[in-house]
Structures are given as structure tokens and as C-alpha cells.
Image (cartoon, rainbow, N blue to C red):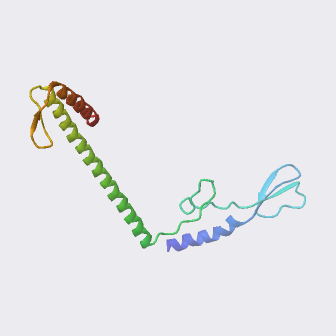
């Protein structure tokens, strides 16, 4: 019952809101406002048009140029499903990339440790051997060990940056 009364009052107020208003100045300089046209003796007269209510921002979002963009329609279930699949694919690709980066970091750490161990072995002195193409062990001389040490340090520096 209350909502019917409220609706009735709003319906009665609608014509008053949409009606034209008049502004005029009489002979004595007094300003008048009315919904009736001014008398012919008025010095100045102006018709005031009712303001159009702006639409809510949710229905017409503004574009970058300040113009109103067309209202967006509701997305269908198929469009929502496609967006979901796209997000899921992007998340899977990001996870795969993260795993590859983690694997690369672990490989780099292992190679760094192996290179440091090689440098430590070469620095301790003693006899160092290498296998020949025929499979025999060849003992390295001091000059060969020094050259191997220089090369091992370069490798360790490149892996342990």
C-alpha cells in the first residue's frame, strides 16, 4: 500500500519537473520566476528549460576523449568461458616460465659449485691426471696445471656471477 502511494506522488511530480519555467524582470526591476508566461509589459524575459538528468556512470563510461562510450552489453556464457580459458592458459604459461627460471637458476648454482671445486683441486697442488685419447692416464706438468687453473678460474667466474 505504501509503495502505491509513493509511486502516485512521484507520478504527480513528474509534470512539474518537465514543465518550462519563465524568468522576467518587471518595470520596477524586480526579477520573477513562474511556470506561467510573463506579461507583455515585462522588460526582459527568458525561458528556462529543465535540465536533463545525467545518466549514471555505470551505464555510460566515458572514453579517453571525454565522449560517452556506448553501453556495454552483458557477456554471454561462451564469452565468459573463453575469457576464463584465456586466463587459465596465461596462468599455466606463467607457471611454466617460472619453473624454467627456477631450473636454470638451480643448474647455474650446480655448475658454479662444480667449477669452484675444480679450481680448488687445481690449487691444492699434487699430481693431476688427464685421460689420453687412447684411455691412458697422463700426468700434467706444472705449466699445464697453471694453464688449467687459469681456464678453471674463467669458467668459475662465468658461472658464479
Q: Report x, y in % for residue 16.
A: 69, 66
| Name of the residue lying farthest toward the right | 41
Vertical side of 151 occupied by 104: above or below: below
Using residue 86 as the reference point, say whether residue 100 is left or right of it.
Answer: left
Q: Quadrant location of the C terminus?
A: top left
Quadrant in the rendering for residue 134? top left
Q: Residue at x 39, y 63 (%)?
A: 86
Vertical side of 72 occupied by 128: above or below: above
Quadrant in the rendering for residue 77? bottom left
Relative depth, front residue between 89 and 45: 89
Q: Residue at x 60, y 68 (%)?
A: 10
Relative depth, front residue between 102 and 141: 141
Using residue 122 as the reference point, say whether residue 37 is left or right of it.
Answer: right
| Name of the residue lying farthest toward the front | 134
Q: Report x, y in % for residue 20.
A: 75, 64
Q: Report x, y in % for residue 81.
A: 39, 69
Vertical side of 12 occupied by 90: above or below: above
Q: Residue at x 62, y 71 (%)?
A: 11
Vertical side of 39 occupied by 146: above or below: above
Q: Residue at x 56, y 65 (%)?
A: 71
Quadrant in the rendering for residue 143? top left
Q: Report x, y in % for residue 63.
A: 59, 56
Using residue 130 as the reference point, say whether residue 10 is left or right of it.
Answer: right
Relative depth, front residue between 122 and 86: 122
Amino acid at each position: 500500500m505504501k509503495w502505491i502511494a509513493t509511486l502516485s506522488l512521484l507520478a504527480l511530480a513528474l509534470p512539474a519537473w518537465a514543465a518550462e519555467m519563465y524568468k522576467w524582470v518587471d518595470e520596477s526591476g524586480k526579477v520573477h520566476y513562474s511556470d506561467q508566461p510573463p506579461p507583455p509589459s515585462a522588460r526582459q524575459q527568458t525561458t528556462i528549460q529543465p535540465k536533463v538528468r545525467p545518466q549514471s556512470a555505470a551505464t555510460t563510461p566515458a572514453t579517453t576523449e571525454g565522449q560517452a562510450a556506448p553501453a556495454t552489453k552483458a557477456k554471454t556464457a561462451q564469452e565468459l568461458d573463453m575469457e576464463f580459458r584465456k586466463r587459465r592458459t596465461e596462468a599455466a604459461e606463467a607457471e611454466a616460465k617460472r619453473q624454467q627460471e627456477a631450473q636454470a637458476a638451480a643448474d647455474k648454482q650446480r655448475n658454479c659449485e662444480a667449477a669452484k671445486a675444480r679450481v680448488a683441486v687445481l690449487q691444492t697442488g699434487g699430481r693431476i691426471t688427464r685421460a689420453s685419447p687412447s684411455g691412458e692416464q697422463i700426468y700434467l706438468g706444472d705449466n699445464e696445471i697453471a694453464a688449467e687453473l687459469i681456464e678453471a678460474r674463467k669458467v668459475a667466474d662465468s658461472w658464479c656471477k
